[in-house]
């Protein structure tokens, strides 16, 4: 699996991988149950939270590469 900034937040959360969820939480994304999580891409959510989507995707993919 590869994370892209075009992925929906809900897709990332639905993987059930707690480490991916921790990465989101560490950059300020805590509302996984909110409706926006179902409708926003990683890039849109990062823009809303003032975070670089490329960096977040990179962190996630670096983690996934270690699995």
Image (cartoon, helix red, strand yellow):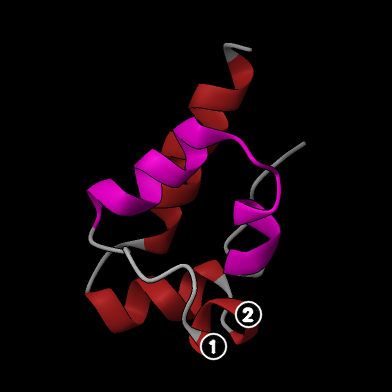
Measuring from the top left, give residue 51's x and y in whole percent: 26, 65
Quarter occupied by the C terminus: top right
Magenta range: 9-27
Neighbours of disc 1 within 10 Å: few (<14), some (14-19), many (20+): few
The residue wearing badge 1 is 35
- Left-right relation of 26 to 13: left
Count of numbered labels shown in the rendering: 2
55 is higher (above) or lower (below) than 64 = below
| Element marked by disc 2 | helix
Q: Which mark is residue 62?
A: none
Measuring from the top left, give residue 25's x and y in whole percent: 31, 52
Q: Residue at x 34, y 79 (%)?
A: 47
36 is higher (above) or lower (below) than 5 = below
Q: Residue at x 52, y 67 (%)?
A: 42
Asked whether the viewer can see residue 7, the reply is no
Q: Quadrant of residue 5?
A: bottom right
In the image, 12 versus 16, the foreground residue is: 16
| Element marked by disc 1 | helix
Q: Main secondary structure of the magenta part?
A: helix
Q: Which mark is residue 38?
A: 2
In the image, 26 versus 65, the foreground residue is: 26
Q: Are marks 2 and 1 in contact (CB under 8 Å)?
A: yes
Q: Residue at x 41, y 62 (%)?
A: 53
Magenta-span inclusion, residue 12: yes
Asked whether the viewer can see residue 8, the reply is yes
Measuring from the top left, give residue 19's x and y in whole percent: 46, 31
Residue, far top: 66
19 is higher (above) or lower (below) than 54 = above
């Amino acid at each position: 699996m590869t994370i892209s900034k075009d992925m929906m937040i809900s897709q990332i959360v639905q993987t059930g991988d707690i480490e991916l969820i921790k990465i989101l939480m560490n950059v300020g994304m805590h509302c996984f149950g909110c409706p926006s999580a179902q409708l926003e891409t990683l890039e849109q959510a990062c823009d809303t939270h003032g975070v670089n989507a490329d960096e977040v995707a990179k962190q996630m993919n670096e983690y996934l590469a270690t699995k």
